[in-house]
Amino acid sequence: MNRMPFSTWSARGILGLDRGRVKTQTRRFIKPQPPDDWEPAEIIRAGKYGGMNLAHHSGEWSENGDPENDIFRPHYKPGEIVAMGEALVPTSCRKVSYAVGGHLIENSAGPAHVVVWPWKVKKLPSIYMPLWAARRWLRIVDVRAERMLDISEEDAQAEGLAGNYAWSGAGWHYDWQASDGAWYADHTSAFAATIRGHNPKMGPEDNPWLWAYTLEQVEKGADGH
């Protein structure tokens, strides 16, 4: 089973811990980045619980991104069940806890007891979270490719952005809050600020291609494990 790592902000959205924020989508960089004139509809087709169809060139299937042949493969496939990766932290008595929520973790893969912190770091990033620590399992419902700034308002809400009506000299308008807590006048600016906040090397004019994953929560063990 794969894990899909999430930031603390994203994990809170999936867990529904912040009022007005529910996260059911996530976007990840396509690596390597396709060319500007890439047409994803011609390369990838993915549907609910369906298979993944990739472009076929010279009798071979590409396993990784291939800019020359315009083949790009998402890391997660429709129908796949993944563990929600989240950061772990030690408690004051050196027990393993989630960075979000603060609950002590029991190792379901071994003896049923609270786990003593076994790592030499002060915080374990979500990408390294062991599978036995997962408290949410997610099914990949749909995968599609799109540019960062092509996100719709509906999808921005599904990404976990919060919105609020506000008053200004021009009247009432809808503001959008990015992951850093700042408010923006439109959803694309708020989403771009969220992506850039987690990727500080991005330039202000960058508009990268992203894989857009739609998620649904499933019972632990839904994949037979």
Image (spheres, grey):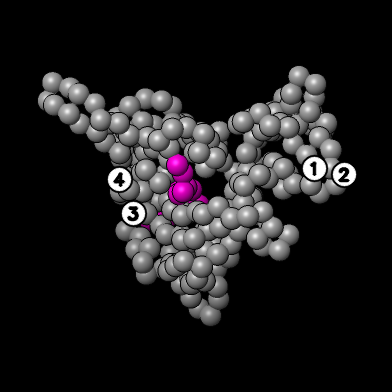
User: Which residue appears at 81% of the width and 35% of the height?
Assistant: 114
Q: Earlier in the sequence, mark 3 or mark 4?
A: 3
Tag 2 near tag 4, CB within 8 Å: no
Q: CA distance from mark 3 to mark 1?
A: 46 Å
Mark 2 vs mark 4, CA separation in Å: 46 Å
For marks 3 and 1, the one nearer the N-term is: 3
Q: From what the image shows, is residue 66 above or below residue 28?
A: below
Q: Which residue is mark 4?
A: 153
Q: Considering the image in quadrants, where does the C terminus appear?
A: bottom right
Q: Nearer the viewer, mark 3 or mark 2?
A: 2
The quarter of the picture where the N terminus appears is: bottom right
Among the two numbered marks 2 and 4 on one chain, the one whose residue lies closer to the N terminus: 2
| Label 3 element class | loop
Q: Which residue is mark 2?
A: 111
Q: Amino acid at mark 3?
A: Asp
Mark 4 against mark 1, which lies toward the viewer? 1
Dot 3: few (<14), some (14–19), or many (≥20) neighbours within 10 Å? few
**Upstream in sequence: badge 3 or badge 2:** 3
Looking at the image, is 180 positioned above or below residue 45? above
**Camera-side mark, 3 or 4:** 4
Tell me which segment is drawn in magenta.
Answer: 22-35
Amino acid type at mark 4: Glu
Can you identify the residue that label 1 sits on? Answer: 107
Mark 4 vs mark 1, CA separation in Å: 40 Å
Kindly indicate whether the residue at mark 1 contacts the one at mark 2 (C-beta within 8 angstroms).
Answer: yes
Instruction: Provide the secondary structure element on which disc 2 rests.
Output: loop
In the rendered structure, which amino acid carries the disc numbered 1?
A: Asn
The type of residue carrying mark 2 is Pro
Q: Residues within 10 Å of mark 2 (few under 14, many from 20)?
A: few
